[in-house]
Image (cartoon, rainbow, N blue to C red):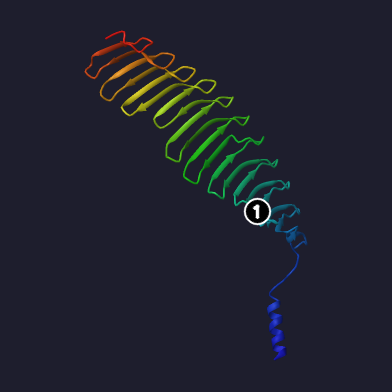
Amino acid sequence: MLGSAGRADSRQSSRTVEAERFVLRDDRGNERAIMTTANGAAFIVFTDANRKTRLSLGVDANGCPSILLLDSNHVNRAMVGIAPDGTSSVRVLDGAGNSRAMLLVGADGRSGLALLDSSGNTPLLLHTTPTGAGGIRVSDRSGRDRLAMGVGEDGAPAINTFDAAGVNTTSIGSASVNLFDSVGKNRVKVGMAADGPCLNLFDRDERTGVAISVGADGRSGLTMHGKDGETRAALGILPDGQPALQLIDRYGRPLTR
């Protein structure tokens, strides 16, 4: 009975091989794969026929997994991993080891795709939020945003352009177009109000200077405003087709009937 039990234990233990390092060799005796641990990390490395590392899979001391793919010059060309904060990423690099494309998904559900140039700038960025908003940002060589477009959490679309200094120059929404001057002041607005289209021209303090509108009832008009924003002149067509002109002094009193 003891001999039978000893043979059973021997068969069971022979199914497990334990070591700190495993080496797989090809028919020429060259190392082609190594499984080992170091400094709390565990990883497997695969090499080519020239003994250059081409693939590495591992888990670091913090428990973060990663996959690395290298070219024949031992330059990292692609990376897949999960960061300690739960962010997962895929990164593609060029022959000089510079990141050129990154796909990220954050632990909070945010995601993004970035395309980079050789200097590390991000000319193109696509991103989303956990609540459904998403957008695209395009930058120039200096890294400044020049174009942004997207859809907000409320479903409203928007497009914005920026000058070389980063100042917003144009803003297009679902029912309006706004133009800004070199210091970011809104100077022109074209939009669709509840009762019809309208055009507003603003001064340097963003006060209305001229307004043009067309109403759903056939009424149309042009108003001109003073420095304080009060209407000083109005010209229009009434719903019955009759023209109308009104001039108003600085005290708000009509000068015409």
Is residue 66 left or right of 215 when viewed as pictured?
right
Q: Which residue is mark 1?
A: 66
Q: Residue furthest left?
A: 240
Query: 224 or 227: nearer the eye?
Result: 227
Query: 123 or 63: nearer the eye?
Result: 63
Report helix, strand or loop for mark 1: strand
Q: Residue furthest right?
A: 29
Q: Is residue 47 above or below residue 251?
A: below
Tag count in the figure? 1
Q: Is residue 32 above or below residue 214?
A: below
Q: Is residue 107 above or below residue 178?
A: below
The location of residue 61, given as percent across then percent down, is 70, 57
User: What residue is rendered at 72% in x and 90% in y?
Assistant: 2
Quadrant where the N terminus sits is bottom right
The kind of residue tagged 1 is: Ser
Is residue 237 left or right of 183 when viewed as pictured?
left
Q: Is residue 214 above or below residue 130?
A: above
Is residue 237 left or right of 108 when viewed as pictured?
left
User: What residue is rendered at 50% in x and 38% in y?
Assistant: 135
The location of residue 256, given as percent across then percent down, is 29, 8
The quarter of the picture where residue 183 lies is top right
Tell me if mark 1 has few (under 14), some (14-19) or many (20+) residues whose alpha carbon lies within 10 angstroms of its own.
Answer: some
The location of residue 173, given as percent across then percent down, is 43, 31
Query: 24 or 84: nearer the eye?
Result: 84
User: What residue is rendered at 65% in x and 53% in y?
Assistant: 67
Is residue 32 left or right of 197 when viewed as pictured?
right
The location of residue 203, given as percent across then percent down, is 46, 17
